[in-house]
Image (tube, grey):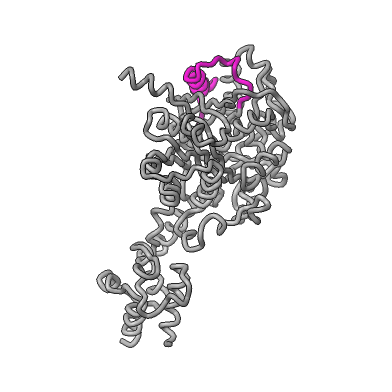
Amino acid sequence: MSEIADKVKKIVVEHLGVDESKVTPDASFIDDLGADSLDTVELVMAFEEAFSVEIPEDAAEKITTVKDAIDYIEKQKAA
Amino acid sequence: MMANISAMKERRVVVTGMGLVTPLGVGVDVTWQRLVEGRSGIRRISCFDPSDLPAQVAGEVPEGPTAEGGFTLSDWVPPKEQKKMDRFIHLGLAAAIQAVEDSGWTPETEEDRCATGVMIGSGIGGLQTIYDASLTVAEGRARRLSPFFIPSALINLVSGHVSIRYGFKGPNHSAVTACATGVHAIGDATRLIMLGDADVMVAGGAEAAVCPLGIAGFAAARALSTGFNETPERASRPWDRERDGFVMGEGSGIVVLEEYEHAKKRGAKIYGEIIGYGLSGDAHHITAPAEGHDGAFRAMKAALKSAGLTPDDIDYVNAHGTSTMADDLELDAVERLFGDAGRKLAMSSTKSAIGHLLGAAGSVEAMFSLLAIRDNVAPPTLNLDNPARESVIDRVALEAQRRDIKVALSNSFGFGGTNASLIVRGV
């Protein structure tokens, strides 16, 4: 697993208080990991902070799974 | 209309659950026992360095294992939820959970859930949270503000969290009247039950303003004690000649109020009954009471009227008594109201042991009044070494007194000139 994926996973575990084993790439923050809409806002802010990236509102709305987050951040970092 | 009013009079309201989080400990029994023993919960402020401030002592809730009467946050609020709430909500939840569990009330039907409401207030709300968020904005990081900032700081969110936790779908309300909040919450919730809006109400106050902004703010208003920084346990000294301001405390006191027949039917334990409630406004000054404390006099008189009692019926008064100049004004009002009946009265200020819990003070002290009736003990006024003035009223100086206590009155007065008195008795 990439360094980014590792870090994303760690942030999700920390913010949503879920077991690490549940944080699979396909896990949906809301449907599988018990987040509500405010949790997802905070999660995106935590990603922005941790990776020093800007995630605009419309992009943030499309980040609904762990994989979505990893892909978006990897793309930003590669650019 | 007349029929409704007479029906209202038939609905009596009793207390069937209690929860306390105070500078003397977490739990009703532990707090009450330490209070009666004459212990003080006032220490040098430890949650931040108070060296820059003139007032450096406060009553903080002691950290420690729950089994030993200490506060362990994760025993009350799951780690994931903790950062979504200011400390006043943490303390309020810890007291509310105790009260609800103590009452044994678990509504099984939708009808019962809709007949169970919550009215928990606070004087100030999430002050430290607002302070922290302000720094974020001031640093030019407004977009980094947590989405939980607002719901963490809002005063009515203790009521919200309690309703969500237990599924209580009845009236969801919150009193905010500075230092009278706790009494207004219990009094108004009692009336909601009397009026038939609910059968059960979880009511009280929660406060956590022992933070730099809270201490600095009240110090700026010249309200806090500053002369006992080296001897914290001596700082809160209601009616004493050397008193020099109040000592801030934090914590929460929550009761479960219940319609009497409802409580009897399910065989609930009953601590006592709320039999009188009186409210008044000073219309005088934003922080100082009027000469003779006429507002206090009228609130107590209104409470007696609503209970159908005379001063002669009252055995114990839990005074507002904050350890400020206003103590003697409250004494004036009590003397004027009680006249000769004051000679057999016990009146103490438990703020001498726990400090002033602001919005939680009234509900905590209403519980102390109920416990005074249960155990026939008047808790002491610590540090009352030399009363600033004499009175026929026994102010229970230094040590608790065993007394026959059947009916008690509890006073709370707040900035803005708001006053409330509550009268309770055993059942």
> Residue B324's image quarter?
top right
Instruction: Look at the image and say whether residue B5 sits in the magenta stretch.
Output: no
Q: How many marks?
A: 0
Q: Is residue B246 above or below residue B44?
A: above
> Which one is in front, B349 or B278?
B278
Q: With A5 as the anchor, is B32 left or right in this view?
A: right
Q: Is residue A20 above or below residue B100?
A: below
Question: Which quadrant of the figure contains the N terminus of chain B?
Answer: top left
Question: Which quadrant of the figure contains the C terminus of chain B?
Answer: top right
Residue A1 percent across, percent down from the top left: 43, 87
Magenta span covers which residues? B288-317
Q: Residue at (65%, 29%) from the top-left corner?
A: B348
Q: Is residue A68 above or below residue B82?
A: below
Main secondary structure type of the part rendered in magenta: helix
Residue B374 percent across, percent down from the top left: 64, 31
Q: With B13 as the anchor, is A78 left or right in this view?
A: left
The extreme top residue here reads: B340
Residue B132 percent across, percent down from the top left: 46, 58
Instruction: Look at the image and say whether residue B300 sits in the magenta stretch.
Output: yes
Q: With B153 as the anchor, is B235 left or right in this view?
A: right
> Residue B192's image quarter?
top left
Q: Residue at (49%, 23%) from the top-left corner?
A: B299
Residue B19 percent across, percent down from the top left: 56, 43
Q: Does residue B299 appear in the picture of this structure?
A: yes
> Which one is in front, A75 or A40?
A40
Q: Does residue B281 appear in the picture of this structure?
A: no
> Which one is in front, B360 or A66?
A66
> Residue B75's image quarter?
bottom right
Q: Is residue B414 above or below residue B20?
A: above
